[in-house]
Image: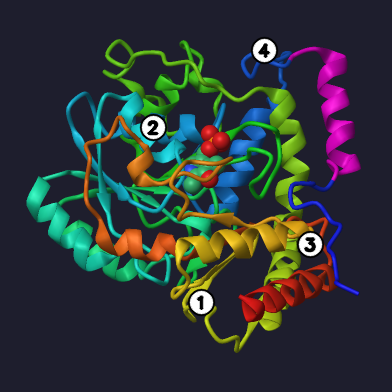
Amino acid sequence: MTERFTGSFTQQESIPDEAIAAAVEVMRHGRLHRYNVAPGEVAETARLEEEFAAFTGARYCLAVASGGYALACALRAVGVGPGDRVLTNAFTLAPVPGAIASVGAQPVFVEVTEDLVIDLDHLALRIGENGARVLMLSHMRGHICDMGRLMEVCDGAGVTVIEDCAHTMGAAWDGTPSGRHGVLGCYSTQTYKHMNSGEGGLIVSDDPQVMARAILLSGSYMLFDRHRAAPPAAAFEGLVGETPNVSGRMDNLRAAILRPQLRMLSDQVARWNRLYRAMEAGLADLHGLRLIPRPAAESYVGSSFQFLLPDHAPAEIEVFLSRCAARGVELKWFGADRPAGFTSRYDHWGYAAPDSLPQTDRVLKGLIDMRLPLTFSEEDCAAIARIIRDEVARG
Ligand SMILES: *Cc1c(COP(=O)(O)O)cnc(C)c1O
């Protein structure tokens, strides 16, 4: 009999009981807004910021309304404005170029390698061509480039790095947490990421001026002294009147849900990586399918899985995908002509200047992607891998 998979690629785990209890507590007292505190009370949001700063080893942290908001706020905080060019990965998701466009700036795309990281030679070339002063580096699908070399290239050219860590919360390069190489690290706590508050974002930085600006931008009114993982009052001087309020705060309900999840994150990462390794083992040594190598310096979070079918024509990939789907295995393809679901490509983003990126086109043409939700077991991953093997071999 033909094997079918019956699990759901989009089903999350439930919110932990401890987080539900904390959320109920916030709803009972009613002080959901982060600056609405009883005398002597420290808001859940301020506590989450302290705890996330400690988790990443950052001096400062700010909790905001979404990952996309975090990215746009980071751009504004380093002074990006209308007409500026911002370098970013050609292989990423729509919120990244969207954040750049939201501040009136122009995304300038950098090629992806077949290991799914930013091409550092092309980056160096683009810096020279464009004179862009900021790189928004997306650790897309959790693949981290050689951060030592990236920082050398950027520092050498005076390029400020903002990290999009939507897929690398809990990951590290050479022992340094993802988000701690650049001036700012931005994270998402949206449902499909590594912690789930429905919507939400976090920003970390060691730079007092930049973080003071980010806090003011997020809509702190004159209440920035209620933040704890924040720079001293002196850092805000001179910025208060100059910095627009672009409200995008996180509320205490979301923070209450996230604090217990942060305590569990390291265990969750270990669970994700067991699923990832089960999938990797199941797909090893298959002719025509290229696995993505994971460098020794990279501590990744295997919350999603990618592979390449480099020699398949688009029509063959379409057949492969529909056969897998018929057997319950929902795969995403980055080579489709039209954007579908969460998956779109640099040439679909019509607000950016048209560009030609032949290497990225070649890689994305064969790139297959799937989520690994924690509701899967290692046996589920082995079953999915068997179905994929079958269908690749059949093709
Ligand atoms: C999810 C995501 C973001 C942030 O998105 P929000 O939905 O706004 O939290 C940023 N970059 C990437 C690559 C993402 O996948």
Secondary structure category for the residue under label 3: loop
Identified by mark 2, the residue type is: Ala
Q: Are marks 4 and 2 in contact (CB under 8 Å)?
A: no
Identified by mark 4, the residue type is: Asn
Position of residue 127 measured from the top left corner of the image (x, y, whole percent): 14, 53
Position of residue 54 measured from the top left corner of the image (x, y, whole percent): 58, 50
The CB of the residue at mark 2 lies under 8 Å from ligand 1: yes
Q: Which mark is residue 325?
A: none
Label 3 neighbourhood size at 10 Å, few (<14), some (14-19), many (20+)?
some
Q: Quadrant of residue 371?
A: bottom right
Q: Residue shown at 10%/46% (left/top)?
A: 131
Q: Quadrant of the C terminus?
A: bottom right
Which residues fall within the magenta stretch?
14-31
Position of residue 102 measured from the top left corner of the image (x, y, whole percent): 35, 25
Secondary structure category for the residue under label 4: loop
The front one of 74 and 312 is 312
Q: Which residue carries the number 1 mark? A: 294
Q: Which comes sooner in the sequence, label 4 or label 1?
A: 4
Label 2 neighbourhood size at 10 Å, few (<14), some (14-19), many (20+)?
many
Q: Which residue carries the number 4 mark? A: 36
Q: Residue shown at 75%/72% (left/top)?
A: 387
Of marks 3 and 1, the one in the foreground: 3
Q: Which residue carries the number 3 mark? A: 327
Main SS, magenta residues: helix
Q: Which comes sooner in the sequence, label 1 or label 2?
A: 2
Q: Which mark is residue 99?
A: 2
